[in-house]
């Protein structure tokens, strides 16, 4: 009599809950993050059309020990989404890295490639939305979904003293990530804010800037001189003995 053949039991793969990614990598989204259906659809389309591009969430660029965080909006289609490095490969990157070099925040010669040897010094660049959005315009729900990863970046920066927000969306994302009311800190180019965060147990300065996009540069909304003034001020505040000093009347802009 033949013995019954026992089939090995298949190991069941745990299902991912709706709108929840699997375990993030180092506090960031996984390569196939499923949180935002619209961004997932675009990512799949781009992978089929441009298989040599990054086409995945873009990680932070810079040392975790940095005292300055530069908050951008989202990867550019032919910029960071293509190259895999924040602000690399488009006009916004040219303006940003040239300005950072002028104030000692980076070294090396920027050549719009992730292997160009550029290194950031005492600053880190992170986008508030990690995947490229259609038309470079993320929806409020997509910004909110990605906030956990942006907050994780802030929390891992143990020496953080200040933030430069590139654009209104980045400005508001910083405030929301730290549970700070927007009405108390309105966005304006060149505006400075002192942020008190219970989560971080320390004060931070926040400086607002218009985004260094090609549109803003071409229309004169943001000139190189205006952008330089932002980072000159950030350098000045970082070089003070303590970032916990209260801003005086002459320090507020």
Image (cartoon, rainbow, N blue to C red):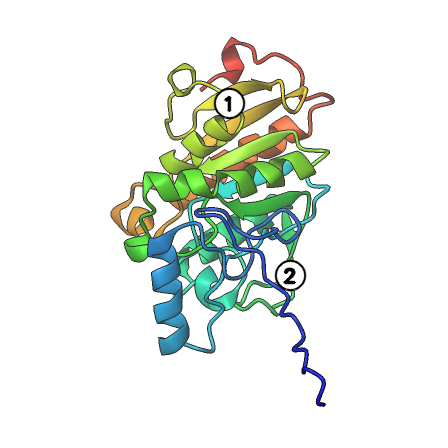
Name the element at disc 2.
loop
Counting residues from the start of the chain, the first of labels 1 and 2 encountered is 2
The crowd level at tag 1 (other Cα within 10 Å; few <14, some 14-19, many 20+) is few
Side (left or right) of 212 relative to 249 = left
Q: 10 Å neighbourhood of mark 2: few (<14), some, or many (≥20)?
A: few
Task: Give the percent coordinates (x, y) of residue 53.
Answer: 46, 72
Furthest residue toward top = 249
Q: Is residue 77 visible?
A: no
Alpha carbon distance from label 1 to label 2? 37 Å
Q: As displayed, is residue 249 above or below residue 210?
A: above
Please say if 237 is above or below 217. above
Q: Secondary structure at mark 1?
A: loop
**Residue nearer the viewer, 4 or 10:** 4
Residue behind mark 2: 108
Image quarter (top left, top right, bottom left or bottom right) of the N terminus: bottom right
x and y, in percent, of residue 16 in the image:
51, 52
The residue identified by callout 1 is 179
Q: Nearer the viewer, mark 1 or mark 2?
A: 1
Residue 9, position in %: x, y? 65, 70
Which residue is drawn at the image coordinates 73% and 41% (left, top)?
A: 65
Judge whether 92 appears above or below 197 on screen.
below
């Amino acid at each position: 009599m033949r013995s019954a053949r026992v089939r090995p039991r298949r190991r069941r793969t745990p299902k991912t809950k709706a709108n929840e990614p699997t375990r993030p990598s180092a506090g960031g989204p996984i390569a196939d993050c499923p949180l935002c259906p619209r961004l997932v659809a675009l990512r799949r389309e781009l992978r089929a059309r441009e298989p040599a591009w990054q086409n995945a969430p873009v990680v932070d660029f810079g040392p975790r020990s940095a005292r300055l965080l530069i908050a951008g909006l989202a990867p550019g289609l032919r910029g960071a989404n293509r190259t895999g490095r924040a602000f690399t490969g488009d006009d916004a990157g040219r303006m940003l890295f040239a300005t950072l070099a002028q104030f000692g925040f980076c070294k090396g010669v920027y050549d719009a490639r992730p292997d160009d040897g550029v290194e950031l010094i005492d600053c880190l660049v992170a986008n508030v939305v990690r995947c490229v959005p259609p038309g470079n315009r993320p929806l409020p729900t997509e910004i909110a979904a990605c906030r956990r990863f942006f907050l994780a970046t802030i929390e891992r920066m143990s020496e953080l003293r200040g933030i430069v927000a590139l654009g209104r969306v980045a400005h508001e994302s910083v405030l929301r990530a730290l549970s700070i009311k927007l009405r108390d800190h309105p966005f304006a180019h060149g505006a400075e804010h002192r942020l008190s965060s219970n989560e971080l147990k320390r004060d931070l300065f926040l400086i607002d800037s218009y985004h260094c996009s090609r549109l803003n540069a071409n229309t004169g909304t943001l000139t190189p001189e205006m952008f330089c003034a932002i980072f000159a001020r950030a350098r000045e505040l970082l070089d003070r003995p303590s970032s916990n000093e209260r801003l005086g009347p002459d320090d507020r802009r």
